[in-house]
Image (cartoon, rainbow, N blue to C red):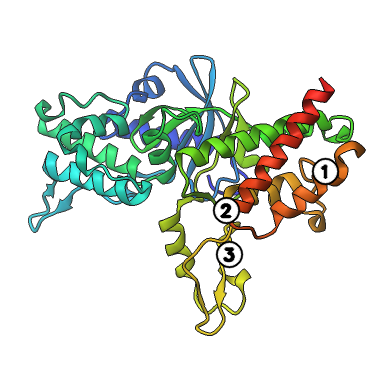
Amino acid sequence: MSLSKCSFLEVENAVYTICDKYQNREALGNLCADLCELNNLKPNSCLPNHLGKDVVFQATYFDNDVVMKSSKLNSEDFEQVYYTNEDGVKVHPSINIFYSMIANTVQSELDVNITSLNNKSLDVLTKLWTRNMKNFPHLPAAVQNAAMSNIWFLVQQNEYLLMKYYEDLNIFPKVIGTCGPFYVVEFIQPLNNYFILFYPSWEEDFTKRAELALKLLNFLEETEKHFPFLHFCDIKVGHFGLDRNGDVKLLDMDMVFFEESLIKNINAIQNCTKSQDCHFIDCQSSCDTISKRCEAKVLDNNFQRVCRNILAGRLVQSYFGLLSSPPYSIYKELSDLLKKCSETLDDKSAHIVASQLKHLLVSFIQEGS
């Protein structure tokens, strides 16, 4: 389903695959019965253009729009939690070893230290799944093993891990539930659809665009407060959206990295001759032209990337920015700020420009109201 086009047949195939696992008691999760038995979770259509995911389709859950996702359609394609011994028997880890596997994954992928929570291991497992794990040690071995497999499939998906571990923050779409390796999140209206509504009259609707730009800036500020070293490396208008409360949320987290992981990806780029060779999608780095290796640093931040790709726009590619064609009263000041924030700046300078841009937009909106 990662192709540019998709059909409902692929949705039916995905549902059949996961429900077959559910009937065999291999797929567990709080939404399995709703999807496979009760018809409360009803798939509507597949959503194309999601690189890195085999399953992305829109559905309704008790009349609410949701999206169901999985990076892989078949659970056999994930790394398995067990190993097979010489006799061909599947050997699953003990609960303590399984928790250590989970803790190591969380620490490496989310850049957090949870070793101090060893005495709360079941709380951590509950946080990462959709079932209360208090009774986990007392479950029959077969159910324990199936639960471990299902949790292990999910935590291998970085987007799920990020959304579920930090679900208390109003930054990412809310995880509603899971079934096997599939997870269901709230539907967020992508911003590019919102743009279409007023694109023919951009100049007249600049106030709406300024309000939306301000929401994006507030979102970035809130994100940085919680995650100062989290980088969005694939900045597109359609990767942000508005929830039912009108709040901006990030939709696509396949190219979201903590700085340590991002630098590893940059270091993997070899034989650079110029700094552009060391850019990881929209995240910029620099090239040591003597050693011809990318340097272990990130030169920009999320604000600068959003400024370049969304607010200012790429005029050479005939792409209008969200803040294009401003009123004459703020034209020069806004143009200067957009030019500055599109350049390479140190963190302190970038924060100053972001603050000035927010102040300009707030003043413009207040004067017009």
Q: Secondary structure at mark 2?
A: helix
Distance (Cα) linking label 1 and label 3: 26 Å
What's the residue at 46%, 28% (across, down)? 174
Q: Is residue 226 left or right of residue 286?
A: left
Q: How many other residues sit within 10 Å of disc 2, few (<14), some (14-19) or many (≥20)? A: some
Give the residue at mark 3: 279
What's the residue at 59%, 52% (across, down)? 348
Q: Is residue 313 left or right of residue 84?
A: right
Measured from the top left, where is residue 173 in percent x and y?
A: 50, 31
Q: Secondary structure at mark 3?
A: loop
Q: Nearer the viewer, residue 188 or 58?
A: 188
* Three-letter amino acid code at the position of disc 2: Asp
Q: Secondary structure at mark 1?
A: loop
Can you tell which of label 3 and label 2 is closer to the viewer?
A: 2
Give the residue at mark 1: 324
- Residue most extreme to the bottom: 290
